[in-house]
Image (cartoon, rainbow, N blue to C red):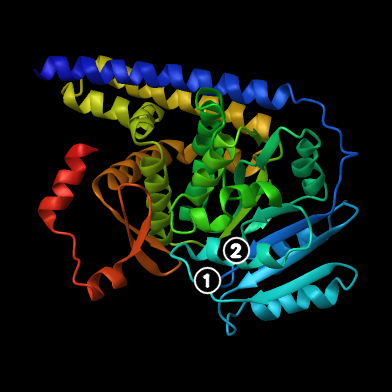
Amino acid sequence: MQQALVWLLALLTAASWAYWLVAWWFVRSFFRNRPSVEFAYAPPVSLLKPVRGLDYQAYENFVSFCCQDYPEYEILFGVADAADPVIPIIERVQRDFPQRQIRLVVARANTTNRKVGLLQQLAAQARYEILVMSDSDMRVTPDYLQRVVAPFADARVGLVTCAYRGAKPLTLTARLEALYMGTAFLPSVLVARKFLQMRFALGATMVVRRRDLERLGGLAVVADFLADDYQLGRRIAALGSRVVLSDYVITAVIGNTTFREQWTREVRWAHCSKVSRPLDYWGLLLTYSTPLALLTWIVSGFAPLGGLLLVFSIVWRWLVAWLVTGYTGDVVSREWLFWLPVRDGLSALVWVAGLLTRHVEWRGERFIVTRDGMLQPVADMRARGRRIPLSRLLKFVKRE
């Protein structure tokens, strides 16, 4: 029995090496063979930014969106609380860029997914047909709007989205998070783009036409989902429109993060994957080369061959990550590649936590994720006396 388990783990490890070879090839092909884009197409754009609290270098992040080399656009910042400490930062941006159309919208988000609730309010007040939705902790270069809007010159395109990489990590946990973004998440997006026919979106940037949103029933149709970005991409694709992954890689400014903050965020991301594509969630096992090799070595009783598998896995992951970060220009991840085995081990633990739990934390609130991917505030469930019994949770785990 033990020998059979060793062979199974060894086969999974070898399959993981093959996965990373495929991922490397897709990243290389995507970034080295970029299609020519006609930047002459530049319709007026409404840029929607839901904000809550102070992200690291929030002012600099906001300013980067005010410095776009783009003919006409407006920026709408949305906050749910009139006492939010980010409001003075937004007002400073308005003063510093009087030539830009910058509006602050204070409106309570009456949805379970607070970010989507704010986006609904912003979309209702936006002036233009093209809506660009972007997270508050993102930073861009002046060609961002040109690059993400240009694909809409093709009437068949219904949504444009971007992958992202981390920048300015100030703590070890922040560096590990940046490593995940650049060496695990981004390659997996390129693999999913190929095999899932790009029927999903990424929340860092989502660009849509207003009329397509209206055909869906507005953002309200995804307002109670955890993975609102996946749901929006899937529904746009169901309309018969194309979802396009831009070759623009947006930057997530990380700053200071604690281990708990990073853990809860990544477990939430894991839940997004699990509820969006349950079968594919198991496929993520193939991304954990080093943990699989380590487990093989341990189960084999620390046999020399198991040790060789582990060493090869570490070197193989380093090599692929080095090449991938070169194609994407990810200087931060390259600088911290030494920590990649630790990062892969942490990713495996996050995967297990995502598999065995149904709770997520998001901006200080705690939710239960239903089987169909919707959010249910824990406070609401307690108020209604609807605690989740252990027996039901165990049944859920078995079904997964």
Report the residue marked by disc 1.
109
| Spot occupied by residue 366 in the image (x, y as percentages of width and height) | 35, 66
Q: Quadrant of residue 7?
A: top left
| Spot occupied by residue 274 in the image (x, y as percentages of width and height) | 36, 41
Q: How many marks?
A: 2
**Could you give the CA–CA distance between mark 2 and mark 1, rounded to whole angstroms?**
8 Å
304 or 329: nearer the eye? Answer: 329
341 or 212: nearer the eye? Answer: 212
Left or right relative to 2: residue 386: right
Left or right relative to 89: residue 385: left
Circle 2 packing at 10 Å, graded few (<14), some (14-19), many (20+), is: many
Residue 209 seen in this snapshot: no
Circle 1 packing at 10 Å, graded few (<14), some (14-19), many (20+), is: many
| Spot occupied by residue 121 in the image (x, y as percentages of width and height) | 62, 68
| Residue type (three-letter) at the residue carrying disc 2 | Gln
Mark 2 vs 1, N-terminal side: 1
| Residue shown at the point (91%, 53%) measured from the top left | 71
Q: In the image as oriented, which residue stretches furthest toward the bottom?
A: 83
| Residue shown at the point (24%, 38%) measured from the top left | 400
**Marks 2 and 1 in Cβ contact (< 8 Å):** yes
| Residue shown at the point (32%, 31%) measured from the top left | 282
Q: Quadrant of residue 93?
A: bottom right
278 or 121: nearer the eye? Answer: 121
276 versus 71 height, above or below? above
| Spot occupied by residue 309 in the image (x, y as percentages of width and height) | 33, 19
| Residue type (three-letter) at the residue carrying disc 1 | Ala
331 versus 286 height, above or below? below
What kind of element bears circle 1? loop
81 or 285: nearer the eye? Answer: 81
Report the residue marked by disc 2.
120
66 versus 20 height, above or below? below
State which quarter of the image contains the N terminus. top left
